[in-house]
Image (cartoon, rainbow, N blue to C red):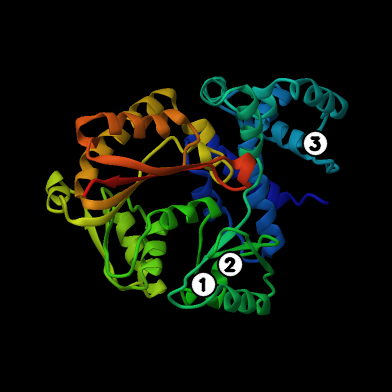
Amino acid sequence: MRLHRNLCFAVIDGLTLIFNEGKYADKVIQQLLKRDKRWGARDRGFVAETTYDMVRWKRLYAEIAEVKEPFDRDNLWRMFAVWATLKGIKLPDWKYFEGTPLRKIKGRFDELSKIRKFKESIPDWIDELGEKELGKAVWTKEITALNEQADVILRVNTLKTTKEKLQEVLFDSEIETEFLANYPNALKLKERANVFSTEAFKNGWFEVQDASSQLVAEFLNVKPGMRVVDACAGAGGKTLHIASLMENKGQVIAMDIYGNKLNELKRRAKRNGAHNIENRVIESTKVIKKLYDKADRVLIDAPCSGLGVLRRNPDAKWKLQPDFVEKIKTTQQDILQQYSKMVKAGGQLVYATCSILPSENQEQVAAFLKSEGGENFTLVKDKKVLAHQSGFDGFYMALLERKA
């Protein structure tokens, strides 16, 4: 592989924004990719993947390069040299790479690879928390899996097409996919491709959604004609899945505290041909109270640490703070207590997170069931999805039933 100056500059500029100005990696990369109209798919792929790679391995590369935050441009070039060297890419004779100690880089890498927090490039506190909650053996395997690049998984929109038909249409656009056992509506891309530019996407035939995330709506047991509330809908990935499982019959009420996210859902629902979704912004507790005892099903896709989705959000490792994890647990329990009141007698509730920590998952459900607010509920079943076992994101989901 030959390194091209303009592509490497784009990566360095992106890293400056992500590391020094706290910008979100996905947003920065979106901007970078619009930088030069002459770039082909391979050029854009290089910029996106190299930037993500360096975000993912920030601690390891900085340690090998012997640089500390905040990183100036020289520091970032030194880290880039480490990245290239470890990938076996020959460094061009640019001034940024003068005097790069190639043998020392490889030696330092071998040495640091014996220490998990460096090898897996994570802050000390996340490493300690993971081991404390999951145990050493499971955490070691899980963090390795969470550092792998995520596959691109599509969820077929069954309101408009079938999995077989979508696979055929994508094949005609030179995008090869494969079915996944036990994930009825999933297609996995054999190679990364820009699926958003396809006619199939524009026509609303699919959404991009990780396989683990696709399990949540299935877990909710919805049937056509029900009244279902997605209480933390966000931009509505799971809402759209619920609408398709309900065959557009009945009512899906999508709620969130952020109106802009629900606006995005409105746009997506139109493309998906999902007509049974009604958006409601949670501006006060009144919005929730109006629905007390009225829903057949309630999904609480609770805000969480997001430690199960580090593969697709590697910058979360550096943004997440210990006090946030503590605060979010209080929020999770509050949401469970309040939103569970929307479930009618005999109805069901799913509590889900994209976290792998028992303190955000099983322990939250147990605390709820022991509380006054949870005494009318029973746990039907729960499912813990770990990345190193499933090959997909880390998730948790619990199905609770309100006594009739």
State which quadrant residue 382 falls in: top left
Determine contact: label 1, label 3, CB under 8 Å. no
Q: Which residue is mark 1?
A: 201
Q: Which residue is mark 3?
A: 86
Of the numbered discs 2 and 3, the one sitting upstream in the chain is: 3
Position of 342 with respect to 358 (left or right) is left
**The residue tagged with tag 1: helix, strand or loop?**
helix
Q: CA distance from mark 1 to mark 3?
A: 37 Å
Position of 50 with respect to 384 (left or right) is right
Q: CA distance from mark 2 to mark 3?
A: 30 Å
State which quadrant residue 63 falls in: top right
Position of 173 with respect to 305 (left or right) is right
Q: Residues within 10 Å of mark 1 (few under 14, many from 20)?
A: some
Determine contact: label 2, label 3, CB under 8 Å. no
The x and y percentages for residue 181 are 62, 59
Q: Which residue is mark 2?
A: 195
Give the amino acid at mark 2: Val
